[in-house]
Image (spheres, rainbow, N blue to C red):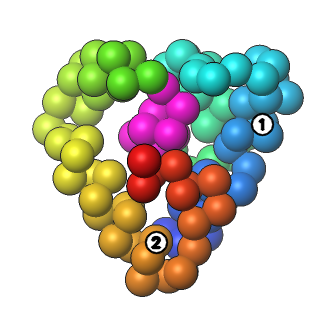
């Protein structure tokens, strides 16, 4: 229940918060995503999801190798997609299918 709520909050509210704080951008940098997650009361356990959604692929690979070296982003993305398809929720998270 809490996992679903936290993931859904990322899908519904993280992009508007980033846009409000930093303006509309195609991609955000890791410090912008991290600051928004911590300062706007998102569950930091899903920080890699925020990175996955809003960092360009080069920055994503670099930051996850540094902050989450044990995490395989391809596997993580598949796990989130499977979880969402079971819950029949996508919201902004439909970008994970790209």
Q: Which mark is residue 81?
A: none
Q: Is 1 above or below relative to 59? A: below
- Give the dominant element type of the magenta stretch: helix, strand or loop: helix
Instruction: Label 1, secondary structure: give it.
Output: helix
* Marks 1 and 2 in Cβ contact (< 8 Å): no
Left or right: where does residue 41 sit relative to residue 17? left
In front of the other: 77 or 48:
77
Query: Residue 47 at what x, y percent from top left?
Result: 46, 40
Could you tell me if residue 67 is visible in this image?
no
Could you tell me if residue 64 is visible in this image?
yes
* Location of residue 71 by image quarter: top left
| Label 1 vs label 2, nearer the camera | 2
Instruction: Label 2, secondary structure: give it.
Output: helix
Crowd class of label 2 (few under 14; some 14 to 19; many from 20; radius 10 Å): some
Left or right: where does residue 46 sit relative to residue 4? left
* Location of residue 26 by image quarter: top right
Query: Residue 59 at what x, y percent from top left?
Result: 38, 17
Q: Is 9 above or below relative to 25? A: below
Q: Is residue 82 magenta?
A: no
Give the residues in magenta.
48-55
* Location of residue 18 by image quarter: top right
Residue at image location 46% in from the left, 71% down from the top: 84
Which residue bears the numbered disc 1?
A: 17
Query: Residue 50 at what x, y percent from top left?
Result: 51, 40
Q: Distance between the residues labelled 1 and 2?
A: 22 Å
Q: Residue 84 carries which label?
A: 2
Extreme residue toward the front, this view? 98
Extreme residue toward the right, this view? 20
Query: Residue 40 at what x, y percent from top left?
Result: 73, 39
Residue at image location 43% in from the left, 76% down from the top: 85
Q: Is 86 above or below relative to 36? A: below
């Amino acid at each position: 229940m809490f996992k679903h709520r936290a993931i859904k909050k990322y899908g519904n509210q993280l992009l508007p918060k980033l846009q409000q704080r930093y303006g509309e951008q195609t991609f955000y940098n890791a410090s912008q995503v991290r600051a928004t997650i911590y300062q706007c009361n998102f569950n930091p356990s899903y920080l890699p999801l925020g990175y996955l959604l809003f960092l360009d692929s080069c920055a994503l690979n670099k930051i996850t190798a540094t902050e989450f070296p044990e995490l395989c982003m391809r596997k993580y993305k598949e796990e989130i997609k499977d979880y969402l398809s079971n819950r029949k929720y996508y919201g902004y998270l439909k970008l994970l299918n790209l």
